[in-house]
Amino acid sequence: MARDYYGTLGVSQDATPEELKRAYRKLARELHPDVNPDEQAQARFREVTAAYEVLSDPQKRKIVDLGGDPLGGGAGGGGGRMGDPFGGAGFGLGDIMDAFFGAATGGGGGRGPRSRVQPGSDALLRMELTLEDCLTGVSREITVDTAVLCDQCQGGGCAPGTKPQQCDTCHGRGEIQSVQRSFLGQVVTARPCPVCRGYGEVIPDPCQQCSGDGRIRARRTITVQIPAGVADGMRVRLASQGEVGPGGGPAGDLYVEVDELPHDTFEREGANLHGTLRIPVTTAALGAVLQLKTLDGTEELRIDPGTQPNTELVLTGRGMPKLRSSGRVDGRGDMYVHLQVEVPTKLDPKQADLLRELAALRGEEEPELASTNGRGHGGLFSRLRSNRR
Ligand SMILES: [Zn+2]
Ligand SMILES: [Zn+2]
């Protein structure tokens, strides 16, 4: 009888070659004898492998689809040794290595020793800025401590007048291959050469200054331009001012992150500023022109007569620069002045008399409790009045 190769791999009859490979890879990872020494798993591994071998070969797959069995009906299960599926045409060692380890192993030949020269990593610094600094932008000198190119060996890692030499152990390949015989046939595994750590070459006489790393730590001072309009958490990038890589590899970038200090007066909300101004009740009633300290100097602030508590005055364009992602500044935000009207709490007798006189002059009546729809509640009001006497 014909075996159910599709069922063995758990794929449908119209599975693409990619789907076949994925299904096989997944099963092989579970069932490979190295992972799973269980007898049943090994038997199943052989079945799965045979199924993959058949279905990944278009001609054999066609036979299956026509109801036949390209491996012959009797080869399933059992203790008998199955014909070596890897010796057959169309299914080489490369395929199974590929299935196991992904494309990284490739068909061999693609990998060489790894490079000693690696790109460097980015570095991050924080810079405290006041709101005023953020308003105008600043130019500031900072001290950075990063890896820089070793000036003795220019990154090469060799003592002056010496050169790297090919590794004797791996003969420059950077990896050591070992061949193991198994029922799969020959399995070739590769691991990085322990002598040269995969570089394929060794430095017999390392540079004294950097111990062969090609870079050294150094402290230097650079000037950073912080544009106007920056805000807490924003980062300014300084290209190639980060860490130099191993072997003198290209430096990463340096990021300067803005750490905006809280301001005594203003709270920032994007490009807008908010401040609170306390005014006496008389000022709110009479109106005034006040001198207000803003970030730009002193501004006149006009309080209209009869200003109510919680009034918000807006000084247009007195906020922070609007810094766009392009780096351009596009106008400025606004400043919001929130007015708090202060009712005096301690009145001496004369002040109290004046206020009573004022109330009498204005013919002020005792307030009535009103619901939000404006209708009075006479009952409650009359009781309040009686309590006060
Ligand atoms: Zn050096
Ligand atoms: Zn080596």
Image (tube, helix red, strand yellow):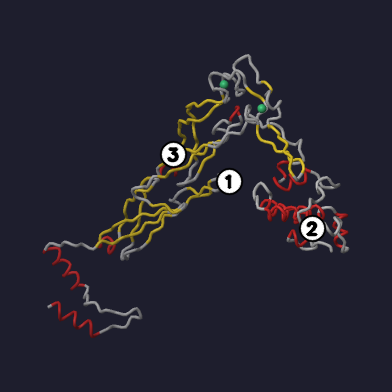
Mark 3 CB lies closer than 8 A to ligand 1: no
Q: Residue at x 35, y 63 (%)?
A: 311
| Structural crowding at the residue carrying mark 3, measured as other residues with C-alpha within 10 Å and reported as few (<14), some (14–19) or many (≥20) | some
Q: Are marks 1 and 3 in contact (CB under 8 Å)?
A: no
Q: CA distance from mark 2 to mark 1?
A: 67 Å
Q: Residue at x 54, y 27 (%)?
A: 148
Q: Residue at x 12, y 62 (%)?
A: 348
Secondary structure beneath dot 3 equals: strand
| Residue that lies at the very extreme toward the bottom in this rendered image | 379
Where, by quadrant of the figure, is residue 126 drawn? top left
The residue mark sitting in front, 3 or 2, is 2
Find disc 2 in the rendering and name its residue.
Answer: 76
Q: Quadrant holding ligand 1?
A: top right
| Residue that lies at the very extreme toward the front in this rendered image | 79
Amino acid at circle 3: Met
| Structural crowding at the residue carrying mark 1, measured as other residues with C-alpha within 10 Å and reported as few (<14), some (14–19) or many (≥20) | few
Residue 335 placed where, x, y %? 41, 54
In the foreground, 265 or 145: 145
